Image (spheres, rainbow, N blue to C red):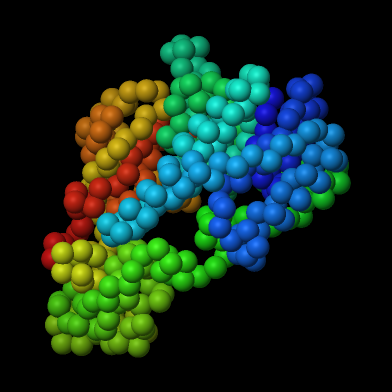
Amino acid sequence: MVVGLSGGVDSAVTAYLLKQQGHEVIGIFMKNWEGDDDDEFCPSNIDFVDAAAVADVIGIEIEHVSFAAEYKDRVFAEFLREYQAGRTPNPDILCNAEIKFKAFLDHAMRLGAEKIATGHYARVRHNPATGLHELLKGSDPAKDQSYFLHRLNQAQLSKTLFPVGELKKTEVRRIADDIRLPNAKKKDSTGICFIGERPFRDFLNRYIAKVPGPIKSDKGRVLGEHVGLSFYTLGQRSGLGIGGVKARGADLRAVQALGQRGVGSHEPWFVARKDMATNTLWVVQGHDHPWLQSTELSAQDCSWVAGSPPASGPMAAKTRYRQTDALCDLVAGSSANSELIFQQAQWAVTPGQSAVLYDGDVCLGGGVIDSSNVQNGQNN
């Protein structure tokens, strides 16, 4: 059994549980980014030291493997292409599909492993009625990571275990503390490794040129200047530089018509649209503005866990991580595209993010939200 040891507590407890079950366990630390090795924002060296310390306590071997070349070609290049196109990608989803459950899985198989295991909060279940492997949400709803794993296929799931997926996070912490793992109290990692805790805009500016343009309200009033459309995402309210701009004239009448009283400097502005053709950033005032509400979406580049799309009909979906499941109807689904209609409007549906479908606890798969087919409450 080969376990991906990240240096965090979840993968550490995963390795411990598997050894307790009698498996011969080997740990592999994956290095996916070559830049910033000595940078405080991407402490991969520190993570490896933590992973090695865990392996020593548990009594297993650990191997350090670099997948940086594969990551750069398969994940980071796509990450940049999406941002340059004005979309907001989720590289963690692509990393799981291309690195952790492809490059890493292939490496483990070459070592003679029968299966791999990671510290993800999800579950795998074999359904004897269909003969298929199902991807299920983790038992801890606050930590469920099935959203990030929805592109996994039958071959990948058949060789994967998620031991902590059956546990609550508090139980994982307790186990780690009981066996005195050196990282028992280590904070959960946040963000993407190659960005880490650094200001996102500063990082992106290394690779994408700033092309300033106008910031306009939904009534066409110029409110300021943006630094480049790639540096903003739908629903964003901070970093716009227009926090003190009050709605007035047509803008004020529009928001008052929506029943938003007291609108002015006290009501925040949100990014609602990005027009790449005119390099215009459109913003609206008020969280519930119609431009931020979507009742339909189209997703492309779909991937289905079962290998084929589910039948059209009612189900649930997430359009972003940690979102509560939203009831919807799958109007059409294929390996290329899917169309969803929601019972209630969804807030700030963002092109480039993933729409992931569920049948109860079962993750069915999903696709990348397509900017050209997101239907907002009002059209510009």
Viewer can see residue 138: no
Quadrant into which the N terminus falls: top right
Viewer can see residue 234: yes
Q: Quadrant of residue 166?
A: top right
Residue under the image location 60 percent in, 42 percent down: 66
Q: Is residue 350 left or right of residue 219?
A: right
Please determine whether, in this image, residue 315 is positioned above or below residue 109: below
Of residues 72 and 159, the one nearer the viewer is 72
Q: Is residue 74 left or right of residue 84?
A: right
Residue 177 rendering spot, x and y as whole percentages: 82, 47
Please determine whether, in this image, residue 70 is positioned above or below residue 49: above
Residue under the image location 56 percent in, 41 percent down: 67
Residue 234 rendering spot, x and y as whole percentages: 32, 63
Please determine whether, in this image, residue 183 is positioned above or below residue 123: below
Of residues 210 and 284, the one nearer the viewer is 210
Residue under the image location 46 percent in, 36 percent down: 97
Q: Quadrant of residue 42?
A: bottom right
Q: Quadrant of residue 269?
A: bottom left
Please determine whether, in this image, residue 248 is positioned above or below residue 368: below
Residue under the image location 54 percent in, 68 percent down: 198
Of residues 117 and 172, the one nearer the viewer is 117
Residue 58 rendering spot, x and y as whole percentages: 83, 36
